[in-house]
Image (cartoon, helix red, strand yellow):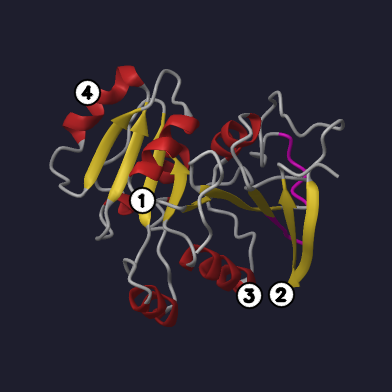
Amino acid sequence: MTAPAPNGRPHTILSCAMSIDGHIDDTSADRLRLSDEADFDRVDELRAGCDAILVGAGTVRADDPRLLVRSPQRRARRIAEGRDEQLLKVVLSARGDIDPRARVLSTGAPGAVVYVADPAHAATARRLADLPDVDVVAVGDPPDPARALADLARRGVRRLMVEGGGAVHTAFLSAGLADELHLAVAPFLIGDPEAPRFVHPADFPNGPARPMRLAGVEQVGTMAVLRYLPGAAT
């Protein structure tokens, strides 16, 4: 397991699948499948090596993900290593308007943590009060991902996987909080200017004057997987 980053927060891996033109979905009512089965298996292996997995509330509302390690062999490996069978689920939300029936909140041990803006804390805590394995924590206004990472470190999380969506990836990358960025590029284009993108406009530390270091390129099924290290300029 990767040791914590030197500043005491979890080692944080951002993971995203996108089209060649940088979109993470289209504008249809159905969820766009970007990854193939080989890439889903790669992501499952990446999840299995982490302690917690984080998404934004928009992803919860749009996709209702479970955020589970799918492979029985990988779950058994986690147990043999003395870890929980599944990851701690984490949701970052400004308003805290998460359905208590969302699958991410009810997939068993070790439960979930919902980080919200300070003004939304009381209402969110009341809404989720009947879920004994869910903690609601205020982390500033707007929600500060650095404060969420500090709290996760106190909970024993050493390795965190962040799966989006765009607002969350933007928040982590603009704050310089990503240790690794894994981009899986699907072999097609969306071409719709209204389709959601990997990141939103922001002031990113990894601009042309401080580029990320490309640490690996791999073909996985039909996907090209790029691994970048944001903190290591070329």
Residue 98, given in percent of the width and then of the height, sits at: 32, 37
Kindly check if marks 1 and 4 are in contact, taking CB atoms under 8 A apart as contact: no
Of circles 1 and 2, the one toward us is 1
Kindly check if marks 3 and 2 are in contact, taking CB atoms under 8 A apart as contact: yes
Q: Secondary structure at mark 4?
A: helix
Q: Which mark is residue 122?
A: 4
Does residue 73 belong to the magenta stretch? no
Q: CA distance from mark 2 to mark 4?
A: 46 Å
Q: Secondary structure at mark 1?
A: loop
Of circles 3 and 1, the one toward us is 1
Q: Secondary structure at mark 2?
A: loop
Q: Amino acid at mark 2?
A: Gly
| Label 4, residues with CA under 10 Å away: few <14, some 14-19, many ≥20 | some
| Label 3, residues with CA under 10 Å away: few <14, some 14-19, many ≥20 | some
Residue at left 73%, top 60%? Answer: 186
Residue at left 72%, top 49%? Answer: 229
